Image: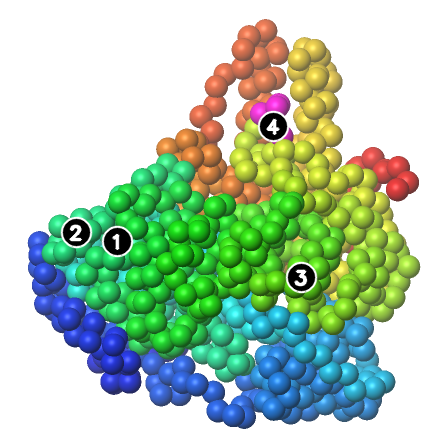
């Protein structure tokens, strides 16, 4: 058995015999394993034993009925004390995406059209009948009575849209590239509970590239150098960079592919669609020189990185390489009906390529391997272009709109010519821990957009760049797809406050009303996320944000969060034991402190410019005390620990050198992000800033301490402050291997109380 628990056979799967004839013909035209590719200038690689799927996980079409065992197992994980009180009944004849909930006290019956829909029915029951929440993160299931309440009358719900898509292309990088299967399994359980049916699977996506490109003139060693470390692979798949954070070992790639295969199987077992990366032409350097007839286009620069080349999809080699890629992918991940690709993402170069013809060739290659499969493309910046749309069968395309709640005056039907699209939200960039989202915009747009006479709205797309923050936003956005009528913003948040901690509480309701009116009522027009913290910014007395592309000022009145903290501290002591309450308390205290950084820094600047050394020292001491308190309060919650992020990365290394390499991959993503040229010239440093215990104390607080010391010295000497090479400072931190706790320390309530005591009271709202 491999370390991750999946068998590694020594032969290519017999399942290749089941491939479509068109695909077999293309594969047969490709060089055989161990042969030299046409025009190859290097020896053929030694054969590498591929991974193989068993017949049980082949991705074959589902039968008319389905096994409820996977849903039952998920229910047992989600509700270990109460799972036995649910009867799950498969009902594929009920219609697509439909569940019915009924039953008496202690005997609840859920009928559903898929395993995932059964879990969505359970989620509806918890929300609307039992009054409990299983959030992302935090839950209140400990408050459930021993005997679950009866359903007053049977309730049937059907999804309002067929596509309920989840996970940004960057999610694996920013949410945790080194997570365990159990962590991914928990994520799938939560997505099913909230009605999602299509989930992007990125883990292990490098393995088909690694295998297939060795047939086209590249050695295994060249491929290992070209493929980035797991933390940076999201952007390699987007054709933005290569190599950084590596090299990767073959063992790591095989184990990640095993993990990705298990994730895909887990989704299929619940009747969900694993969305797999498709192939659109990314190749290593020198591809055309090694493959006769190939034409490649240099893709230029992305934030200071040299982008990988693009193989013209209209060139004859593309179809063979795509076929080899899909065959290798199928051997590990099985088949799917939805594939994710964004050619020319964020500034790619077309050269002399006909974009329409290229798009058609990409879709043809996909359909040769997977007849009729949908191609999911991200709606972002100017993509997809009219040229791309003109070259494809748009009935087999799904646009995941990443800008639905960001800008105004959007007409997606006119913009995309009636191509089906999913209304999306990206309310988190880089994994920022900031609270907030344009939730009122979702409610204002989803119903009217769907009701338009020519509407092409066919789904929702949950696309934060990192998941596991803002549980209220996750709950509300996924509710859009299942509520048959308009959702009242205020009433929804009142209901959320009640179930979030297990029963209604006046103080909890007041806290969430403050949060609703503040960070969850930000408007569209320019931003879809809230501002980040100045504590996590690179030090400057003129700092207005941490990440270069984040909002530069408060997007809501700071007093709303400060008042919410006071209300949360007054919640009934009987409701303070849930993980949901503890997370919300810590997160709100963290946000209140972060917002105060925007009040404190201008005061520090004014004292420095007035050359008032006494006041400067008093204010910088207050700032540093705030950062110490911030590190302590975040250290009290398991979701806000640097130690977990680092220990996960090290767990994948086979020896000390490999462990150190993967830790650097994980640390650099949070800090320098890339090399000096990309960190500075590409403005990528601190893009993934987040207020985590350990990260605050070891990087952010040390940076500010060094900055204030330089300014203090300048005031004393009456001279200009000495320059600090911040990239060198941050790179030194990224190269460290210091250990940090991966278990929470401290009492959340006591620490949140200390935060409230340290901050000025907010005026009445």
- The reply to whether residue 633 is in sight is no
Q: Secondary structure beneath disc 3?
A: loop
Q: Residues within 10 Å of mark 1 (few under 14, many from 20)?
A: many
Considering depth in this image, is 574 or 424 the residue closer to the camera? 424
Mark toward the start of the polypeptide (3 vs 1): 1
Q: Nearer the viewer, mark 3 or mark 4?
A: 3
Quadrant in which the N terminus is drawn: bottom left
Q: Which residue is mark 2?
A: 288
Dots 3, 1 in contact, CB < 8 A: no
Q: Does the magenta run of residues contain 694?
A: no
Rounded to the nearest angstrom, the CA distance separating label 3 from label 2 is 48 Å
Q: Splitting the image into 4 quarters, where does residue 365 fall? A: bottom left
Question: Which image quadrant for residue 604?
Answer: top right
Report the Cα–Cα distance between label 3 and label 1.
Answer: 38 Å
How far from the left and from the top, in percent, is residue 273?
A: 49, 74
The residue where tag 1 is placed is: 312
Q: Which residue position is annotated with label 4? A: 543
Q: Name the N-terminal-most of marks 2 and 4.
A: 2
Residue 350 in sight in this render: yes
Label 4, secondary structure: give it. Answer: loop
Residue occupying the point 67% across, 10% down: 611
Q: Which residues are magenta?
A: 540-544
Q: Which residue is mark 3?
A: 452
Residue at image position (80%, 77%) is: 130
Nearer-N-terminus badge (3/4)? 3
């Amino acid at each position: 058995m491999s370390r991750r628990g999946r068998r590694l056979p020594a032969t290519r799967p017999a399942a290749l015999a089941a491939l479509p004839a068109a695909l077999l013909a293309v594969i047969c035209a490709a060089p055989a394993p161990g042969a030299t590719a046409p025009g190859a200038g290097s020896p053929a690689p030694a054969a590498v034993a591929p991974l193989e799927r068993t017949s049980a996980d082949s991705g074959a079409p589902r039968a008319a009925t389905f096994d409820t065992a996977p849903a039952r197992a998920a229910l047992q994980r989600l509700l270990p004390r109460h799972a036995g009180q649910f009867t799950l009944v498969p009902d594929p004849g009920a219609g697509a995406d439909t569940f019915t909930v009924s039953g008496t006290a202690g005997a609840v019956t859920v009928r559903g059209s898929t395993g995932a829909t059964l879990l969505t029915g359970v989620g509806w029951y918890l929300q609307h009948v039992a009054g409990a929440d299983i959030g992302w993160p935090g839950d209140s299931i400990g408050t459930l009575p021993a005997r679950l309440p009866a359903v007053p009358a049977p309730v049937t719900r059907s999804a309002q849209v067929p596509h309920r898509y989840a996970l940004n292309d960057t999610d694996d990088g920013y949410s945790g590239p080194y997570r365990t299967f159990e962590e991914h399994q928990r994520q799938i359980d939560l997505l099913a509970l909230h009605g999602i049916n299509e989930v992007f699977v990125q883990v292990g996506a490098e393995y088909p590239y690694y295998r297939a490109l060795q047939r086209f003139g590249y050695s295994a060693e060249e491929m290992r150098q070209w493929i980035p470390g797991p933390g940076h692979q999201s952007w390699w798949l987007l054709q933005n960079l290569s190599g950084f954070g590596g090299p990767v070992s073959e063992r790591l790639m095989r184990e990640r592919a095993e993990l990705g295969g298990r994730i895909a199987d887990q989704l299929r077992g619940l009747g969900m669609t694993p969305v797999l990366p498709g192939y659109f032409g990314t190749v290593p350097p020198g591809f055309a020189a090694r493959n006769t007839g190939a034409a490649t286009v240099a893709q230029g620069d992305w934030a200071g990185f040299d982008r990988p080349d693009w193989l013209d999809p209209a060139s004859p080699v593309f179809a063979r390489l795509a076929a080899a890629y899909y065959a290798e992918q199928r051997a590990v991940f099985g088949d799917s009906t939805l594939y994710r690709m964004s050619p020319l993402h964020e500034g790619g170069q077309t050269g002399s390529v006909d974009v329409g013809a290229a798009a058609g060739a990409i879709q043809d290659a996909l359909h040769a391997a997977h007849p009729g499969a949908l191609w999911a493309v991200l709606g972002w910046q100017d993509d997809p272009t009219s040229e791309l749309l003109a070259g494809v069968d748009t009935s087999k395309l799904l646009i995941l709109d990443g800008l639905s709640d960001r800008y105004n005056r959007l007409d997606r039907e006119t913009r995309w010519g009636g191509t089906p699209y999913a209304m999306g939200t990206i309310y988190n960039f880089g994994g920022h821990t900031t609270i907030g989202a344009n939730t009122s915009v979702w409610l204002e747009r989803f119903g009217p957009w769907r009701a338009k006479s020519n509407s092409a709205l066919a789904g929702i797309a949950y696309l934060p760049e990192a998941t596991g923050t803002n549980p209220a936003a996750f709950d509300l956005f996924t509710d859009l797809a299942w509520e048959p009528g308009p959702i009242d913003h205020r009433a929804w948040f009142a209901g959320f406050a009640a179930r979030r901690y297990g029963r209604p509480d006046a103080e909890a309701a007041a806290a969430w009303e403050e949060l609703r009116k503040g960070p969850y009522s930000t408007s569209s027009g320019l931003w879809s996320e809230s501002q980040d913290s100045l504590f996590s910014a690179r030090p400057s007395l003129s700092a207005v944000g941490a990440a270069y592309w984040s909002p530069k000022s408060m997007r809501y009145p700071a007093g709303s969060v400060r008042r919410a903290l006071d209300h949360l501290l007054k919640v009934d002591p009987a409701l303070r034991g849930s993980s949901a309450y503890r997370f919300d308390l810590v997160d709100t205290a963290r946000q209140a402190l972060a917002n105060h950084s925007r009040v404190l820094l201008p005061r520090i600047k004014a004292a420095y410019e007035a050359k008032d050394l006494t006041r400067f020292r008093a204010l910088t001491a207050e700032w540093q005390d705030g950062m110490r308190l911030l590190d302590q309060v975040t250290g009290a919650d398991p979701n806000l620990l640097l130690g977990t992020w680092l220990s996960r990365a090290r767990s994948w290394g086979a020896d000390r050198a490999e462990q150190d390499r993967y830790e650097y991959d994980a640390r650099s993503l949070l800090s320098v992000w890339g090399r000096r040229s990309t960190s500075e010239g590409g403005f990528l440093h601190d893009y993934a800033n987040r207020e985590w215990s350990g990260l605050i104390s070891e990087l952010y607080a040390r940076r500010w301490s060094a900055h204030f010391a330089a300014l203090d010295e300048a005031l004393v000497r009456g001279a200009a402050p000495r320059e600090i090479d911040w990239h060198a400072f941050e790179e030194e931190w990224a190269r460290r291997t210091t250990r940090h706790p991966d278990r929470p320390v401290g009492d959340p309530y006591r620490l949140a109380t200390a935060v409230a005591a340290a901050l000025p009271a907010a005026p009445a709202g």
